Image (tube, helix red, strand yellow):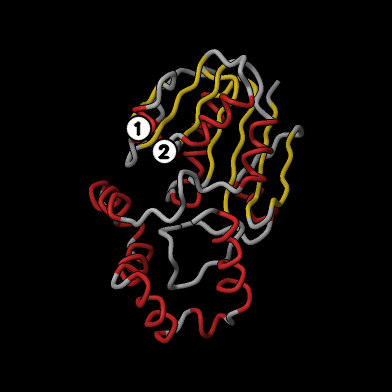
Amino acid sequence: MNRETTNRIRFVIEDVIPPILRDSRLFRGMASLAWGDHISHLARFRERAPFLSAAEYEQLYRQHPRVHEGTDNSEACIRKIAAEIRGTSVCDVGCGTGALLKRIRSANPALERLAGVDFAIDDASAIDGIEYVAAKIEELPFSDGEFDTVVCTHVIEHILDYRQAISELRRVSRRRVIIVVPREREYRYTFNPHFNFFPYTHSFLRAMHPVPEQHECVDIGRDIFYCEDKS
């Protein structure tokens, strides 16, 4: 399934079905027909977020079903990201399968260095020409300003200490930070293990505080695209 399809499904589930039904046992029961007990596991996962051990956190993500083929980004987001790359080095934090890095490389053939970081998915380690590093976003093993452009898509919504994560993205970037998050509302029962929810662009800008003067924050479909220029 691609992102465009899930975005259409998300519109119905998140914006059409009223909250009184979305948080009900009836919705949980219907959702469990598709995902079984995993729906209840996700709800408990969010409820226990402040108390989760590192092992519990990693276990859920390794067991979580892969919904999208290759990347969580829509085609519109991929094109926007590829067009906003600056410099000759790129790091994709939360790179997953590495599909986005391959698209970035294809659109920017002059790039000299591409790196991918993830902690639960290591598919990108098998891609020629891409440095893969197993690490968590809150503690990136890179020096200050090591990459011209740092990309992070569909990750911040999963991170409990998202301010520390954003601080690390800013630290290791020299010229540009690009972040994409889903534009969604919080409900008790969902099909994803998200901790943070950004229903509007200004909701996300509060998470990015302090916001530099040179920035862009726009809706792309049901995603929020954020670009911070440091050059």
x and y, in percent, of residue 95 in the image: 45, 36
- Circles 1 and 2 in contact, beta carbons < 8 Å: no
Q: Which quadrant: the C terminus?
A: top right
Q: Marks 1/2: CA distance? A: 15 Å
x and y, in percent, of residue 52 in the image: 29, 55
Residue mark closest to the camera, 1 vs 2 = 2
Residue closest to the far right: 213
Helix, strand or loop for disc 1: loop
According to the image, label 1 marks what residue?
135
According to the image, label 2 marks what residue?
97
Q: Residues within 10 Å of mark 1 (few under 14, many from 20)?
A: some
* Residue visible at 34% across and 40% down in the picture: 121
Answer with left or right where residue 40 lies relative to residue 162: left
Helix, strand or loop for disc 2: loop
The residue type indicated by label 1 comes to: Ala
Return the disc, 1 or 2, that comes first in the chain's sequence.
2
| 82 versus 51 height, above or below | above
